[in-house]
Image (cartoon, grey):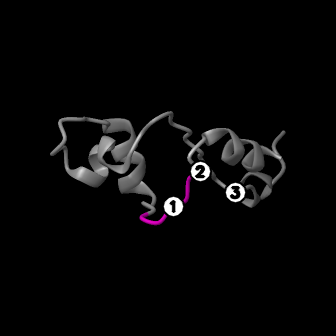
Amino acid sequence: MARSGSRADKPNILVIWGDDIGITNLSCYSDGVMGYRTPNIDRIAQEGMRFTDNYGEQSCTAGRASFIT
């Protein structure tokens, strides 16, 4: 039996970690101009939100390690 309200109280967060990917590699940001088609990410962006400001290290190792700890 499900507890009432327990599911609604949890945040709905999706993290996508890509390797060597730029903003133009996602068609929701570039409208497919670069030739890439990412329909599933496009749907998530349309139903949720898109972020335009980000931060990344030269080496992704430090950023990934700090994110998961």
Nearer to us of marks 1 and 2 is 2
Residue extending farthest to the bottom is: 53
Q: Which residue is mark 2?
A: 57
Q: CA distance from mark 1 to mark 3?
A: 21 Å
Marker disc for residue 54: 1
Amino acid at dot 3:
Pro
Q: Residues within 10 Å of mark 2 (few under 14, many from 20)?
A: few
Amino acid tagged 1: Asn
Q: Quadrant of the N terminus?
A: top right
Q: Is residue 10 above or below residue 34?
A: below
Could you tell me the amino acid type at mark 2? Glu
Q: Is residue 33 left or right of residue 22?
A: left
Q: Residue at x 42, y 48 (%)?
A: 44
User: Is residue 59 shown above or below 31?
Assistant: above
Residue at image mark 3? 11
Say which element carries label 3: loop
**What whole-number distance in Å separates the C-alpha atoms at marks 2 and 3?**
27 Å
Write down the quadrant of residue 22 in the picture: top left
Among the two numbered marks 1 and 3 on one chain, the one whose residue lies closer to the N terminus = 3
Q: Position of residue 5 (x, y in %)?
A: 78, 58
Kindly indicate whether the residue at mark 3 contacts the one at mark 2 (C-beta within 8 angstroms): no
Q: Which is more toward the observer, 20 or 68?
A: 20
- Residue range (magenta): 52-56
